[in-house]
Image: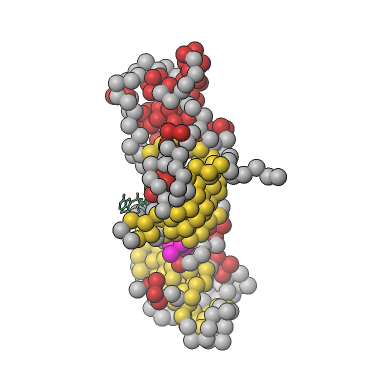
Amino acid sequence: MTAPPRLELRHVSRRFGGVNVVDDVSLTIAPGQVTCLLGPSGCGKSTTLRIVAGVDRQDSGEVRVDGLLLSDDTRHVPPEERGIGLMFQDFALFPHLSVAENVAFGLRGTRARNAARVAELLERVNLPDFGSKYPHQLSGGEQQRVALARALAPRPRIMLMDEPFSGLDERLRDEIRDATLDLLKEAGTAVLLVTHEPDEAMRMADEIALMRHGRIVQQGAPYNIYNNPVDRAAAGFFSDINVIRGRVRGALTATPFGDFLTPGVPDGSEVDIIIRPQHLRIDFDRAGRGPNPTPQDGQAARASVLRARYMGRESLVEFRMDHDGSQLRATVPGVFLPRAGTALWLMIRRDRCFVFPVDRAAAE
Ligand SMILES: Nc1ncnc2c1ncn2[C@@H]1O[C@H](COP(=O)(O)OP(=O)(O)OP(=O)(O)O)[C@@H](O)[C@H]1O
């Protein structure tokens, strides 16, 4: 028999004022796995986390750890008996305790054993000589690392993290994020991390659960979620997108780039063909002619540059399509700043396009 997942949520729902803030959420996390709940503000991420921590109660559904029931609509193991580590943005260290005392706070062993564990963890978060300092003597990043050491000290089987790095500047954030991930993986801790930043989820997660209006709308490895989004909103959550809208005629949709095969969509209905700006290719105008069509890119389309902006690592070029006046954006690595009005040719990587029927109800 295979071992049960470390953490399992089964059909968990929570209502506030008649609204399903968490709506039938199910997920499993294996030891050493990091799952990110990702979604816009108010979609129910923190409420899900609070239910797992035991500081809130679901109206229905189950939370299990290693197969054992922690809570359902009648049973509720209190938070302090769940063996779950917490690391939240407002991680507040105890100001009257030294760094070492903060880290030792949740430990139950002998004094000598605890001291060894505290020393080991402070070493791991790169603060070996900080044990006797007090929180007010530390920078924000140092405090955060102490909080991490404190959360990890009792070797929790599960760690819940709610936007844990959002108070830090970017460079420090990357550093602490990587150190945290190493430590959690090493300890085999199952992690449920809440974030509204796609970059953070892509960087941290083994699996992303994309949430909207209390529901998980898509779940999978970052690569799959990014490259195979379930709908237009899921595609747009991860990057800027271009949307080419067309109407289906005989399983084909006409675009500035020629006809697209759009099978399975009823004749006469509208579709959105979505392409990320980095998957547009640019070619030069050869006296009014563009590059030859290729099986991968299809037909090229002529466009004029509206504006081009240097973004550091890449340049963003906005175009107006000759075909129908629609506007598209392309990003190209490095410096490429054509003047407004320049005629260029665009091609789209057809294998990188996503086609979705237009959902009028969702669009309004
Ligand atoms: N105790 C509560 N009473 C009433 N409504 C609540 C309560 N807690 C949360 N909500 C509502 O539930 C919804 C989801 O809140 P939640 O904090 O889970 O969202 P979130 O996805 O974590 O958002 P954010 O990223 O902004 O923290 C929100 O509309 C919020 O106002």
Image vertical order of residue 3 relative to residue 281, above or below = above
Q: Is residue 19 above or below residue 29?
A: below
Q: Is residue 6 magenta?
A: no
Number of marks in the rendered image? 0
Asked whether the viewer can see residue 244, the reply is no
Q: Residue at x 54, y 47 (%)?
A: 8
Q: Position of residue 133 (x, y in %)?
A: 34, 18
> Looking at the image, which residue sits at the far top?
112
Asked if residue 254 is positioned above or below residue 197 in the image, the reply reads below
- The coloring applied to the image is secondary structure
The quadrant the C terminus occupies is bottom left
Horizontal side of 30 relative to 70 (left or right) equals: right
Image x and y of residue 77, in percent: 45, 39
Question: Which is nearer the eye, 49 or 59?
Answer: 59
Q: Nearer the viewer, residue 222 or 308?
A: 222
Task: Look at the image and tell me in which quarter the N terminus lies.
Answer: top right
Q: Quadrant of residue 39?
A: bottom left
In-front residue for pair 340/23: 23
Quadrant hosting residue 136: top left
Depth order, front residue of 195/319: 195
Q: Which residue is rendered at x = 51% and y = 76% of the image?
A: 257
Judged left or right of residue 56, residue 95 is left
Residue 237's place in the image compared with 325, above or below, is above
What is the x, y in percent for residue 208?
A: 51, 52
Q: Main secondary structure of the magenta part?
A: helix
Instruction: Please indicate, yes or no, whether residue 107 appears anywhere in the rendered image.
Output: yes
Q: Position of residue 96 (x, y in %)?
A: 29, 21
Q: Which contiguous range is marked in magenta?
A: 233-238
Q: Residue at x 38, y 41 (%)?
A: 55
User: Which residue sits furthest front?
Assistant: 74
